[in-house]
């Protein structure tokens, strides 16, 4: 697997819809405390299928698990973390799970869409066949952002939707054997 900092397109900077300069870069070990703080402050808790966990201990475990095992990308405004996205690239299935959380006050400003584009590039570059996520069926904002980048529904029920983003790999074209039509 490529190291966090080696991905094309990172670090990146852009202006959000309110003209704020947002910097996007790969997570580093020194970011752990700030990431934990983002989730301690995050509201509403449990908004995304029980995440971020409301219970402090469970939340700490969850952040530690992502920080140590996932590919993490952060969005910053004036040195403060305002967005976090993660991909479980080490999953054995080749179809990593995807997470995206934007801090209250920074939502609906294009930051999520920008991070989605970055993560899509990373997943593709890492050779994933597809990435998957689960979202509450009532979370219209998230579903809109995911659909825009190419996610489609692939299951779920009335309460939650499973979505996937597939990467089509071009197959090598079959060559005709010399001197024949190729048919037997
Ligand atoms: C869902 C989330 C990640 C999206 O990130 P974001 O930065 O807010 O999203 P963007 O601003 O890039 O795009 C949101 C899109 O949804 C649209 N939108 C906003 N509110 C909406 C609503 N109630 N219904 C439908 N679409 C809505 C916006 O218009 C925008 O589309 P556009 O670019 O075509 O105008 C972010 O809002 C968030 O962290 N929410 C809480 C946590 C969560 O739900 N995470 C997802 C589960 S993994």
Image (cartoon, grey):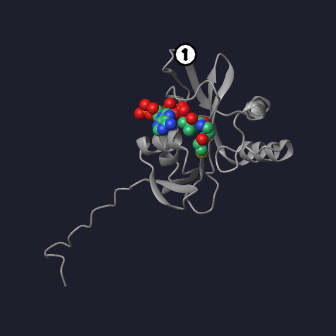
User: Which residue appears at 41% of the width and 41% of the height?
Assistant: 148
Residue that extends furthest to the right in the rendered view of this protein: 57
User: Which residue appears at 67% of the width and 34% of the height?
Assistant: 27
- Rendering coords of residue 179 (x, y %): 13, 74
Give the quarter of the figure containing the C terminus: bottom left
User: Which residue appears at 53% of the width and 49% of the height?
Assistant: 126
Q: Secondary structure at mark 1?
A: loop
- Above or below, 50 against 26 in this view is below
User: Which residue appears at 52% of the width and 22% of the height?
Assistant: 13
The quarter holding residue 95 reads bottom right
The quarter holding residue 38 reads top right
- Above or below, 55 against 131 in this view is above
The answer to whether any part of residue 7 appears in the image is no
- Above or below, 18 against 104 in this view is above
Residue that extends furthest to the bottom in the rendered view of this protein: 184
User: Taking 30 as reference, is 47 left or right?
Assistant: left
- Rendering coords of residue 139 (x, y %): 55, 44
Label 1: few (<14), some or many (≥20) within 10 Å?
few
- Rendering coords of residue 112 (x, y %): 53, 34
Label 1 near ligand 1 (CB < 8 Å): no
The answer to whether any part of residue 130 appears in the image is yes
In front: 141, or 115?
Answer: 141
Q: How many marks?
A: 1
Look at mark 1 in the image and give the residue it sits on. Answer: 20
- Rendering coords of residue 76 (x, y %): 63, 24
């Amino acid at each position: 697997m490529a190291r966090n900092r080696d991905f094309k397109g990172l670090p990146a900077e852009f202006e959000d819809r309110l003209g704020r300069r947002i910097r996007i870069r790969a997570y580093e070990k020194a970011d752990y405390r700030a990431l934990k703080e983002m989730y301690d402050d995050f509201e509403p808790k449990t908004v995304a299928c029980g995440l971020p966990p409301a219970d402090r201990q469970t939340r700490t475990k969850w952040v530690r698990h992502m920080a140590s095992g996932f590919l993490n990308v952060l969005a910053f405004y004036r040195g403060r973390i305002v967005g976090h996205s993660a991909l479980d690239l080490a999953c054995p299935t080749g179809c990593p799970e995807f997470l995206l959380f934007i801090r209250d006050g920074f939502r609906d400003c294009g930051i999520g869409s920008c991070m989605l584009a970055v993560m899509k590039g990373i997943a593709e570059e890492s050779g994933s066949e597809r990435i998957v996520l689960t979202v509450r069926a009532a979370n219209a904002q998230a579903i809109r952002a995911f659909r825009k980048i190419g996610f489609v529904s692939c299951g779920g029920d009335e309460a939650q939707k499973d979505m996937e983003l597939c990467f089509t790999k071009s197959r090598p074209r079959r060559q005709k054997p010399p001197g024949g039509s190729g048919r037997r």
